[in-house]
Image (tube, rainbow, N blue to C red):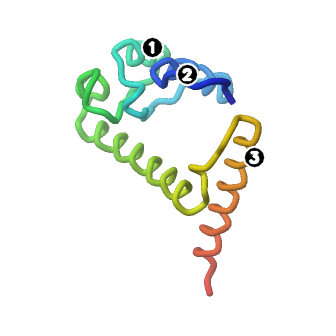
Amino acid sequence: MESGNPADSARCLPMLERHCAQYGKPPTHAAFDGDHASRENLQDAKEMDVEHAVFSRKRGPKAEDMAPSPWIFDRLRRFRASVEAGISWLKRCFGLGRCRGPARFKAWVHSAVFVHNLVRIARLRPG
């Protein structure tokens, strides 16, 4: 967890570096929030051998620069939208939007995600 509130645009490269450190290689496809959109972040991702790095907002790099085909571009944008939908559900149903202060943030997120997973498992259980 980071202290303060760093700009999203400054977090793109560190996220990719953390992914490489954890998995030993860069992702082939990456979908970022629109706040990460910049030519520099796209260039950094390409230099790290990320084949397709897509930003969800229209501003910034052109779609053709991010992904070679409109199909890949749309698919990655939809993936990002589904992630946002999950975050929204956690906020609305499990109080994730009420996290206050860095000391309790991590525990609050863990408990909200845990309850979310329990609800999902319960819904999948044949009844």
**Which mark sits nearer the N-terminus, 3 or 1?**
1
Tell me which numbered mark, 2 or 1, is placed earlier along the sequence.
Answer: 2
Q: Amino acid at mark 2?
A: Pro
Of the 4 image quadrants, the one containing the C terminus is: bottom right
**Residue 115, image x, y percentages:** 68, 62
The residues bearing labels 2 and 1 have C-alpha atoms spaced at a distance of 18 Å
**Counting residues from the N terminus, which is met first, the one under dot 2 or under dot 3?**
2
Quarter of image, res 90: bottom right
Marks 3/1 in contact by CB < 8 Å: the verdict is no
Q: Secondary structure at mark 2?
A: loop
Which residue is denoted by mark 2 in the rendering? 6
Q: From the viewer's perspective, is residue 77 above or below residue 43?
A: below
- Which mark, by number, is residue 98? none
Instruction: Give the residue pinned by disc 1.
Output: 44
Q: Position of residue 34 (x, y in %)?
A: 37, 31
Q: Nearer the viewer, mark 2 or mark 1?
A: 2
The quadrant in which residue 35 appears is top left
Local crowd at mark 1 within 10 Å, few (<14), some, or many (≥20)? some
User: Label 3: few (<14), some or many (≥20) within 10 Å?
Assistant: few
Is disc 3 placed on a helix, strand or loop? helix
User: What kind of residue is marked 3?
Assistant: Ala
Element marked by disc 1: helix
Q: Residue at x 61, y 83 (%)?
A: 126
The type of residue carrying mark 1 is: Asp
